[in-house]
Image: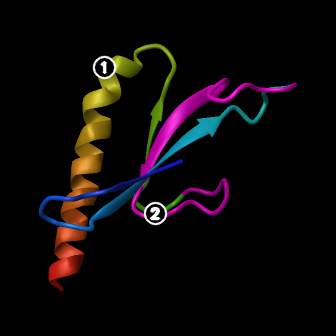
């Protein structure tokens, strides 16, 4: 899991990027192995349940075509941080 924090306006806006491991993967796993998706969310996920405002990018076939949508979601999370910091 990565914590992204904006150092430019809005300073301090946060997003969590979580690398999801295939729950059906069996056996010992090396770091980074069996990652099936990446999730971006405004709050730190505490379990496997979905987090409100999350976006999941499946790393299956065609993931590169969906990458711009992932970055758009991160930008939206950054904007939400700006709105909540000005409230």
Give, as a single range, the part of the protein colored magenta.
Answer: 27-50
Could you tell me which secondary element the residue under label 2 belongs to?
loop
Residue 44 on the magenta span:
yes
Quarter of the image where one finds residue 31: top right
Q: What residue is rendered at 21% in x and 59% in y?
A: 7
Residue 68 vertical position relative to residue 18 in the rendered view, above or below:
above
Of mark 2 and mark 1, the one earlier in the sequence is: 2
Quarter of the image where one finds residue 13: bottom left
Residue 7 vertical position relative to residue 20 in the rendered view, above or below:
below
Residue 5 on the magenta span:
no
Residue 50 vertical position relative to residue 86 in the rendered view, above or below:
above
The prevailing secondary structure element of the residues shown in magenta is: loop
CA separation, marks 2 and 1?
Answer: 24 Å
Query: Which numbered circle lies on residue 65?
Result: 1
Residue 79 vertical position relative to residue 35 in the rendered view, above or below:
below
Q: Is residue 26 left or right of residue 20?
A: right
Q: Give the tally of numbered discs.
A: 2
Could you tell me which secondary element the residue under label 1 belongs to?
helix
Residue furthest front as drawn: 7
């Amino acid at each position: 899991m990565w914590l992204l924090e904006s150092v430019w306006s809005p300073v301090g806006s946060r997003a969590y990027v979580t690398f999801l491991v295939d729950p059906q993967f069996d056996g010992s796993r090396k770091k980074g192995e069996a990652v099936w998706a990446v999730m971006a969310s405004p709050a730190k996920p505490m379990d496997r349940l979905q987090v409100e405002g999350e976006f999941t990018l499946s790393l299956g076939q065609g993931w590169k075509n969906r990458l711009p949508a992932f970055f758009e979601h991160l930008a939206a999370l950054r904007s939400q941080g700006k709105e909540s910091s000005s409230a």
